[in-house]
Image (tube, rainbow, N blue to C red):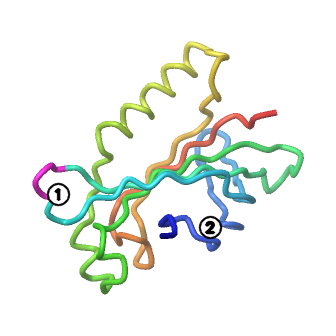
Amino acid sequence: MAEKSFFTRSFIGRNIVFGSSRPSTWTLTEKLSEEVFQKDRISSQNSGIISVSHGTFHCRNVHDHSDTAMIKIIMQIPYAASELEYSQYRAQQASNEVPFLEQWEIDARKKLAINKCTSTHTLHNVKFETQGTNGSVPGGFIVYMRLEAVP
């Protein structure tokens, strides 16, 4: 059986804008990896665990193509077996709350960056958004983290 993928080819070429004191725009150029953590409806409702997929992409700055980085995306995904349901049904699963383990990773990366840790990819930006009507879970969360590129 083929591995499920929620970061389809439609993500390649997508621009991610990180707004801060110096906004920057990054284009996703290649999917490096994806990890899917999906529960069925009953398991999710009983445990309170939200299904997510983690995608890691190579990207480049739209204004300086020699400036490359990685973007890790954490996205809410629908319950197992509901992927093909109408978007209105999938939207009922939406959460704007990032799960504990994923939030823990974001917080840890922020602390490592503040303390100038060199043994991991440096976190440069984090962006929290809500998925649009065409998202896997309309109204669900999607988080973008721009990380230092691997040489």
User: Which span is picked out in magenta?
Assistant: 44-48
Q: Main secondary structure of the magenta part?
A: helix
Residue extending farthest left = 46
Mark 2 residue element: helix
Q: Which residue is mark 2?
A: 11
Against 56, residue 124 (above or below) is above
Query: For residue 125, which quarter of the picture?
Result: top right
Q: Which residue is mark 1?
A: 43
* x 66%, y 47%: residue: 23
Q: Amino acid at mark 1?
A: Ser
Tag 1 near tag 2, CB within 8 Å: no
Mark 1 residue element: helix
Total numbered labels placed on residues in the image? 2
Residue 38 is inside the magenta segment: no
Q: Residues within 10 Å of mark 2 (few under 14, many from 20)?
A: some
Against 74, residue 86 (above or below) is below
Q: Earlier in the sequence, mark 1 or mark 2?
A: 2
Q: Position of residue 122 (x, y in %)?
A: 64, 28
Against 85, residue 123 (above or below) is above
State left or right for residue 17 relative to residue 76: right
Q: Amino acid at mark 2?
A: Phe
Query: For residue 101, which quarter of the picture?
Result: top left
Q: Nearer the viewer, mark 1 or mark 2?
A: 1
* x 24%, y 80%: residue: 89
- Decide which of 111, 35 is in the foreground and name it: 35
Q: Position of residue 142 (x, y in %)?
A: 43, 56
Q: Residues within 10 Å of mark 1 (few under 14, many from 20)?
A: some
Q: Position of residue 21 (x, y in %)?
A: 62, 38
Q: CA distance from mark 1 to mark 2?
A: 29 Å
